[in-house]
């Protein structure tokens, strides 16, 4: 039986599973005698239906619409709560990917027991707050709904954040800030839908609660559109960056790796998620302007003469002009424009100095240099991690921002020099149609997976 490789993750997983199991035993013993089996099965079924509709978002996140039916069960006064809510949290959230074992067994159990704990927290919140307000007090009822919803969401997000933090060793507060921002909007709407479902189930009939699947499906549709749009955007940016790799004879995937290294440095420097994303995108597109440089200069095997150098040095400006017309790429313009500015002001195109150079550009120039030194090129072998770091250290304060070099050094100290090791993608060859067909049949999803 496979266990988490990481000791901290194992501890968190075991703690949550045991706490969830204890709560289940506690609410089930002695068995409540007012269990309405039909209602229990109904809410479990609705939750199962909602769970089957979860949407995978980028970065391994999953958006689900199970919060509404679980909270409907919490709010339903005819259910023996918290017994019912806990069991619905456990059984109602089983998904196809759990059955197909697409996630390890302990991950499935963790998610289910996290739902048990969250449903229990929501039930407790309801028990504690409901007596304080009159039934027909609109403000009081709204307050109760919000407190119950918050108890569910914060517990759920907190447990998800704990395990990610244990796995990645990233500070809990940072992941928490990111996760809660993303979760809060979608989930708060589901809190109110959950309460309405319980009311309609009570006053009109259980069948009528199924009508709420319409707004839930709409929410799911917007999650899906969001995921698709992002995948399309990143896929297009990645394809563009590969185009420039193909043209200047760099090893395939250079821009992609620069983007990953730059993103990791930005994360290590505690920048905001939005900044990190922009730096990653700019890392992918930093040399896009080389499309505007003549081929005989771009691919010249010997040293460039001063005139050719002058033409080559225009590529950041061309890059900025290429990106500027697109509204979604415009935030990257200054990062791309200044990715050859040196820290001491000796770079181009503007000769900016120190902090006047955008931080993203200072990060990309380090990532670019490190990547170029540590991966093989057609015309020279890689010099290896140690010598690359030596070079970066030698030119810090001159070409590179010392803070950025330090961040990269710490990052590699923590993760090992293999952190950005290159999977040896073959250089791009222009294939014949038959070769292309053959390759695509062999690796149909390679590009899609890459884009995600
Ligand atoms: Fe460049």
Image: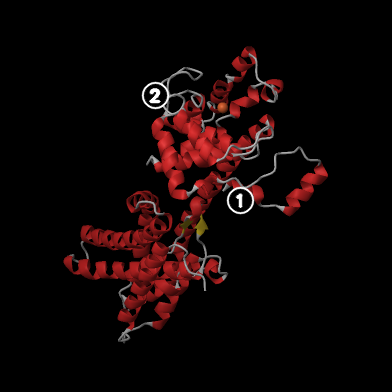
Which quadrant of the figure shows ligand 1? top right
Q: Is residue 112 visible?
A: yes
Question: Which coloring applies here?
Answer: secondary structure
Q: Is residue 237 visible?
A: no
Q: Quadrant of residue 232?
A: top right
Q: Foreground residue, 110 or 235?
A: 110
Residue at the (30%, 67%) spot, across then down:
122
Label placed on residue 354: 2
**Is residue 447 shown left or right of residue 81?**
right
Residue named by callout 1:
449
Does 102 appear above or below 408? below
**Is residue 298 shown left or right of residue 349?**
right
Residue at the (65%, 18%) spot, across then down:
304
| SS label for mark 1 | helix
Q: Which tag is nearer the camera, tag 2 or tag 1?
A: 2
Separation of residues labelled 2 and 1 (CA atoms): 38 Å
Q: Quadrant of residue 383?
A: top right
**Residue 18 pos. (x, y %):** 36, 74
Does 233 appear above or below 97? above
């Amino acid at each position: 039986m496979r266990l988490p490789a990481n000791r901290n993750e194992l501890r968190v997983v075991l703690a949550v599973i045991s706490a969830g199991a204890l709560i289940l035993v506690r609410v089930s013993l002695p068995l409540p005698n007012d269990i309405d089996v039909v209602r229990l099965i109904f809410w479990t079924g609705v939750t199962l239906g909602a769970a089957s509709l979860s949407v995978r978002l980028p970065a391994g996140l999953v958006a689900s619409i199970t919060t509404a039916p679980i909270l409907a069960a919490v709010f339903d006064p005819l259910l023996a709560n918290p017994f019912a809510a806990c069991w619905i949290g456990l059984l109602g959230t089983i998904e196809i990917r759990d059955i197909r074992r697409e996630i390890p067994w302990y991950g499935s159990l963790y998610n289910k027991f996290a739902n048990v704990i969250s449903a229990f927290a929501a039930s407790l919140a309801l028990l504690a707050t409901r007596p304080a307000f009159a039934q027909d007090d609109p403000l009081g009822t709204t307050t109760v709904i919000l407190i119950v919803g918050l108890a569910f969401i914060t517990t759920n997000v907190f447990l998800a954040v704990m395990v990610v933090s244990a796995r990645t060793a990233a500070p809990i507060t940072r992941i928490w800030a990111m996760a809660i921002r993303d979760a809060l909007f979608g989930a708060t709407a589901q809190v109110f839908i959950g309460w309405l479902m319980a009311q309609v189930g009570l006053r009109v009939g259980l069948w009528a609660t199924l009508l709420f699947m319409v707004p839930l499906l709409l929410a799911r549709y917007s999650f899906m559109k969001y995921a698709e749009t992002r995948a399309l955007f990143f896929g297009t940016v990645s394809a563009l960056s590969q185009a420039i790799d193909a043209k200047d004879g760099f090893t395939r995937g250079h821009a992609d790796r620069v983007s990953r290294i730059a993103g990791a440095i930005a994360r290590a420097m505690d920048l905001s998620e939005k900044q990190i994303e922009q730096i990653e995108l700019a890392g992918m597109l930093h040399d896009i302007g080389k499309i505007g440089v003549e081929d005989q200069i771009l691919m010249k095997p010997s040293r460039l003469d001063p005139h050719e150098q002058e033409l080559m040095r225009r590529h950041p400006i061309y890059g900025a002009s290429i990106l500027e017309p697109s509204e979604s790429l415009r935030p990257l313009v200054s990062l791309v424009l200044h990715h050859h500015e040196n820290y001491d002001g000796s770079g181009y195109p503007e000769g900016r100095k120190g902090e006047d150079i955008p931080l993203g550009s200072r990060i990309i120039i380090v990532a670019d240099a490190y990547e170029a030194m540590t991966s093989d090129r057609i015309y020279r072998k890689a010099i290896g991690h140690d010598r690359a770091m030596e070079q970066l250290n030698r030119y810090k304060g001159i070409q590179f921002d010392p803070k950025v070099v330090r961040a990269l050094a710490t990052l590699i100290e923590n993760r090992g020099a293999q952190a950005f090791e290159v999977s040896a993608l073959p250089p791009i060859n222009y294939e014949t149609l038959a070769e292309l067909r053959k390759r695509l049949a062999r690796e149909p999803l390679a590009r899609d997976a890459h884009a995600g």
